[in-house]
Amino acid sequence: MKSPRIVLLHATPVAIDPVLAAFAQGWPEAELVNLLDDALSADRAREADLGEEMIERFVAFARYGHRIGADGLLVTCSAFGPAIERAAAVLPVPVLKPNEAMFEAALAQGDRIGMLATFAPSIGTMEDEFAEESARLRPSATLATVLVPDAIDLLRKGDADTHNRLVAQAAPRLGGMDAVMLAHFSTSRAAPLVRERLEVPVLTAPGAAVAKMKRLVTGAQAAA
């Protein structure tokens, strides 16, 4: 049996290395294809809300990923929730939001969930998605979000060390949570430093997403 082809849809290059590392650890047999359109994140940052034109652009991006043989599509940028939902509705293979599996894991830990974010335009859609998941899995859950300004700009300039340090310095503001999530794939590289600052589970998106994609794709192939 050929290896499943998983197409990774990136809107920023800083998300690529963390998800590749997660696949290397959690599903090395998968054949990975990286598609990058970094104009998406730049243009998204200029929009207060995700408009129809941007949604259509993203769906076209996902359709191309399916056309080249994807058995599953994993989106690695968290600012496009409604567009990912649209793509999932029109494509016949699994299309995963970057954070849905991490939300499920966090809600299993308790009611008080914290989130460290570095890309402000993504926060609104992520909080909406979290509310949907909590309504389904744990209606009593609450989410507290802390934005770490400037960190992602430093990461894009190649200064990962300062990015990680700024994220870790903000972590104690979420003390007392039952779990803390690192909002973006790019933020996951700060996990070791954040865990030094907190005594609660610190969850990252890439590993949880890889595990869920593997379950969905291998289950579908076994049933075929």
Image (tube, rainbow, N blue to C red):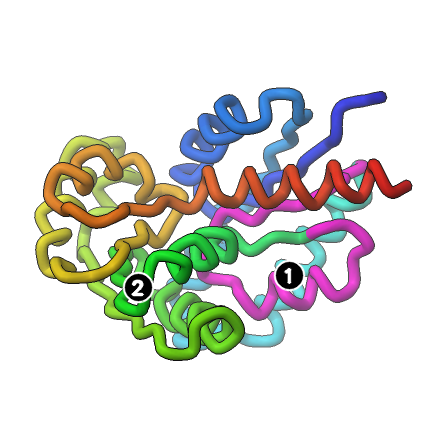
CA distance separating discs 2 and 1: 21 Å
Above or below: residue 44 compared with residue 184:
below
Do the residues under discs 2 and 1 have CB atoms within 8 angstroms? no
Q: Position of residue 73 (x, y in %)?
A: 66, 45
Q: Nearer the viewer, residue 70 or 41?
A: 70
Q: For the C terminus, which image quadrant?
A: top right
Identity, as a three-letter code, of the amino acid under mark 1? Arg
Q: Quarter of the image holding residue 176?
A: bottom left
Query: Image point 71% across, 51% down: which residue?
Result: 94
Q: Which mark is residue 26?
A: none
- Magenta residue span: 69-94
Identity, as a three-letter code, of the amino acid under mark 2? Ala
Q: Which mark is residue 120?
A: 2
Q: Residues within 10 Å of mark 2 (few under 14, many from 20)?
A: some
Question: Judging from the image, what secondary structure is the residue with disc 1 in?
Answer: helix
Q: Position of residue 85 (x, y in %)?
A: 64, 66
Query: Image point 59% across, 45% down: which residue?
Result: 212
